[in-house]
Amino acid sequence: MEVNRESIRGFAEASLDFNPLHLDDRYMEGSSFGKTKYQGVIAHGMMNFALITRMMTDWLGPRGGIHRRLETRWLKPVYPGDVVSPQATISKKLKTVKGQWVLFIIEVKNQTGELVAQGEAMAEFPSPQS
Amino acid sequence: MEEFLEKFEKNFWKDWEKRKTWDEIQPGELRPSHPVTLTKEMIQKFARAIGDLNPLYFDEEYARESPYGGLIAPPSIHIMLMFACTPHDDWMKEPGTINAGQSWFYNVPARPGDRIRLVCKALDRFIKKNRLFVIHENVFYNQKDEVICSGRGWTIRPR
């Protein structure tokens, strides 16, 4: 997904997160975040979270799987003009007493291949008898 | 939804000094919250914002014939509900709040018409690399007191 000011504003309106980090360049230029300096507004980390979730539900739905868990860590900011691509890789399949689970490694990269977020996801595939 | 949005204060700078600082956030103490009725419009606006046109969120007939038996919300709808269910002076709305990480577990889907309730609190606060961290936990319930989802977040506080 290509991130731009319009999509960031759209996500702010839809998520009700109007933090000036995402909307106000002047605030970002004048602010200090410890050692972190940003080059203007950044996309919501939770926009990436929602995009990862969309990827999971798009893949799992037709296969009968249910998205059960997502854990993410934000590594680098996403700026207007960036293109972010989430990816999931199956790391393990296992059965529990009452379920069948698939674990995933999650990565989100930008257009230069930099990792901007990483995490793990879990999906459940209900047993036919359950 | 229009009425709800009219009342929602989008200017997070308004009365920002009244919000709790890192020093004032008490781990274990419940954050004030209020129930919100989730509408189809809220769900669809959120889904569209990430380009997600899954028919489970848009097509009533398709959704009715699906295992869900009706329209549902995407699992990540809690992102919006967090801001919808908390008052304007909640410290999560402090300008400059940085999201460091999140983990969420999903139980039953949220649906249009659900009366959503949030129980939330800080669990811990600490200083690392000169930054002020808070760990917080959140549980969303529907009107039947079923857990929709539960999650934990790590944020860096601006002050």
Image (tube, coloured by chain):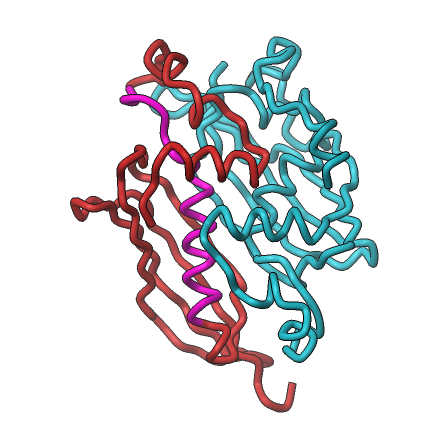
Residue B148 image offset from top left, x and y in percent: 68, 56
The residue at 31%/66% (across/down) is: A89
Residue B119 image offset from top left, x and y in percent: 72, 41
* Residue B18 forms part of the magenta stretch: no
The residue at 24%/45% (across/down) is: A110
Q: Can residue A115 be seen in this view?
A: yes
* Viewer-proximal residue among B106 and B77: B77
Magenta-tinted stretch: A36-59
* Residue A44 forms part of the magenta stretch: yes
Colour in which the image shows chain A: red
The residue at 68%/20% (across/down) is: B89
The residue at 73%/32% (across/down) is: B30
* Viewer-proximal residue among B22 and A106: A106
Residue A37 image offset from top left, x and y in percent: 28, 19
Quadrant for the C terminus of chain A in the image: bottom right
Q: Is residue A36 visible?
A: no
Q: State the image quarter where residue A91 is shown.
A: bottom left
The chain painted cyan is B
Horizontal arrangement in the rendering, residue A127 relative to residue B64 (left or right): left
Residue A2 image offset from top left, x and y in percent: 31, 45
* Viewer-proximal residue among B131 and B42: B42
